[in-house]
Amino acid sequence: MATNPQQKKYTIAVVDDEPSIRDLLTASLHFSGFDVITASNGKDAVAVIEKNHPDLIILDVMLPDIDGFTVTSKVRAHGVQAPILFLTARDDTQDKVMGLTVGGDDYVTKPFSLEEVIARIRAILRRTHQQKDDNPVIRIADLDINEDSHDVTRHGKLIDLSPTEYKLLRYLMDNKGRVLSKAQILDHVWQYDWGGDAAIVESYISYLRKKIDDVTYRDEDGTEKKVVPLIQTKRGIGYMIREPRQ
């Protein structure tokens, strides 16, 4: 079975000299289940990275002392193999080529979408950690998502989900055992902050429950049974998905 990258507590290093960007990325990464360490310049970045050995590095190209490419060369020379996602203010082909040449893995151009950065991080972690057996299936109890085909099954039965329902389910599964607020779900699934009624989240959670948790099957002796509900509501807080309690 595949290991979902979010089941391991990954540490991300955020290196940027702009406090607002560092704070924004740090908050978003924490919300997405990552641990975060930060640095505001190249010299500190090298020290922090070599000391903490993060699983991935978000690295601004334009730093006040040494640039991100030089930081990359220095940490690579000291054996740091963590993937690097460059942040660049210039949509410049030469910068992108240079970044990949010195050992970077991907880049995002400022201004960027937090959704895009998180998606890139997860894609890089899946690719670099290889999920060991190269199996694209993420599983919680008898609920499976195949990341390659986007097929969803519950106790072996194929579940038909809309693209939004799939994205919501995937977000819940990425954060298994963790309560997600309506605001977090709106920001991730709908990619914007919902300033008014958040009933859309309640509606889609209801849709998911009907499809995911209202599934019946027959056991070996032919008795009809219902699957154990996985999606839970924490009143006044939000929603979560987790393994059934024994």
Image: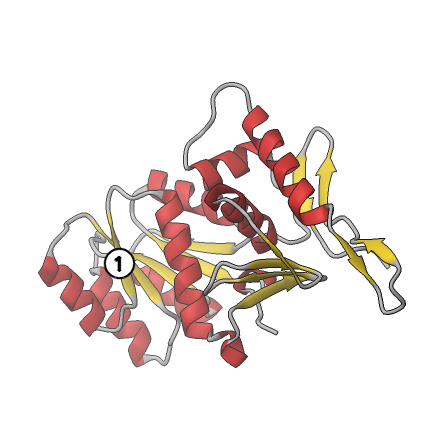
Residue 198, picture quadrant? top right
The reply to whether residue 48 is in sight is: no
Residue 140 position in % (x across, y down): 67, 60
State the residue position of label 1: 107
In the drawing, does residue 142 fall left or right of residue 168?
Answer: right
Identify which residue is drawn at 71% across, 61% down: 155
Image position of 141 with respect to 88: above or below: below
Identify which residue is drawn at 18% across, 73% down: 101
Quadrant where the N terminus is found in the figure:
bottom right
Can you name the residue that lies furthest to the top here?
Answer: 196
Q: Amino acid at mark 1?
A: Tyr
Identify which residue is drawn at 85% across, 56% down: 224
Image position of 79 with respect to 187: above or below: below
Quadrant where the C terminus is found in the figure:
bottom right
Residue 165 position in % (x across, y down): 53, 43
The reply to whether residue 237 is in sight is: yes
Residue 19 position in % (x across, y down): 35, 41
Question: For numbered disc 1, what is the local secondary structure?
Answer: strand
Q: How busy is the neighbourhood of tag 1: few (under 14 within 10 Å), some, or many (20 plus)?
A: many
> Between 132 and 68, which is closer to the camera in this rendering?
132
In the drawing, does residue 230 fall left or right of residue 134?
Answer: right
In the drawing, does residue 225 fall left or right of residue 69?
Answer: right
Identify which residue is drawn at 67% across, 48% down: 212
Can you name the residue that lies furthest to the front here?
Answer: 222
